Image (cartoon, helix red, strand yellow):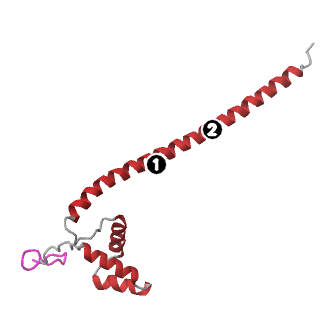
Amino acid sequence: MSTSSGKQPASGGGDPAPKPSRRVFSPEYKLAMVAEYENAANGEKGAILRREGLYSSHIIEWTRARDAGHLGQAGTPDSGAASAGSRVKKSAEQIELEKLRRQNEKLQADLKKTRIALDIMGKAHALLEELSESADNDNPPRRS
């Protein structure tokens, strides 16, 4: 009997294609591609990406890494160990700096709110004093 679903069993009984492996790019290649991409005219940038089989997100990530100093000169001896150690320290300092900046911004906002509230309270106090003085001067008529 035949199946009504129309599906045919795979011939060979195994996986038809091997699992693709992830591509790994060297720092030299990344730096060369970023430089070539940045120096290309706008119409040629897509052609470079197609030729190399890359996505624009690759270039964006590699540019950010280069600007952050994470794509250092790979040809220098012991550059990997030295840059890894300095990155961890720099990263921790950056995290602390960002945390302190956020805390400073929050405290500045709280201070601004407090100053506005004090200003409002001062005006309310002055208004109540003025109302109290005018109430003392104006005696309401007595009911008989």
Residue furthest top in the image = 144
Q: Give the residue drawn at x 33%, y 55%.
A: 90
State which region is magenta: 1-15
Q: Which residue is mark 1?
A: 101
Q: Give the residue drawn at x 30%, y 52%.
A: 89
- Label 2 or label 1, whichever comes before in sequence order: 1
The answer to which quarter of the image holds residue 125 is: top right
Q: Do the residues bearing badges 2 and 1 touch, measured as CB atoms within 8 Å?
A: no
Name the image quarter holding the C terminus: top right
Where is residue 8? Give x, y as percent.
Answer: 14, 78
Q: Is residue 34 above or below residue 120?
A: below
Q: Is residue 36 above or below residue 127?
A: below
Q: Please state which amino acid type lies under the numbered disc 2.
A: Arg
Name the image quarter holding the N terminus: bottom left
Where is residue 18? Give x, y as percent.
Answer: 13, 75
Where is residue 22? Give x, y as percent.
Answer: 20, 72
Q: Secondary structure at mark 2?
A: helix
Q: Give the residue drawn at x 60%, y 40%.
A: 113
Q: Is residue 87 left or right of residue 115?
A: left
> Which numbered circle lies on residue 115?
2
Where is residue 95? Give x, y as percent.
Answer: 37, 51
Q: Is residue 30 left or right of residue 2?
A: right
Q: Give the residue drawn at x 80%, y 23%.
A: 132
Q: Please state which amino acid type lies under the numbered disc 1.
A: Arg
Magenta stretch, main secondary structure class? loop
Q: Is residue 123 above or below residue 3?
A: above
| Residue 26 painted magenta | no
Between marks 2 and 1, how big is the CA–CA gap?
Answer: 21 Å
Residue furthest front in the image = 77
Q: Residues within 10 Å of mark 1 (few under 14, many from 20)?
A: few
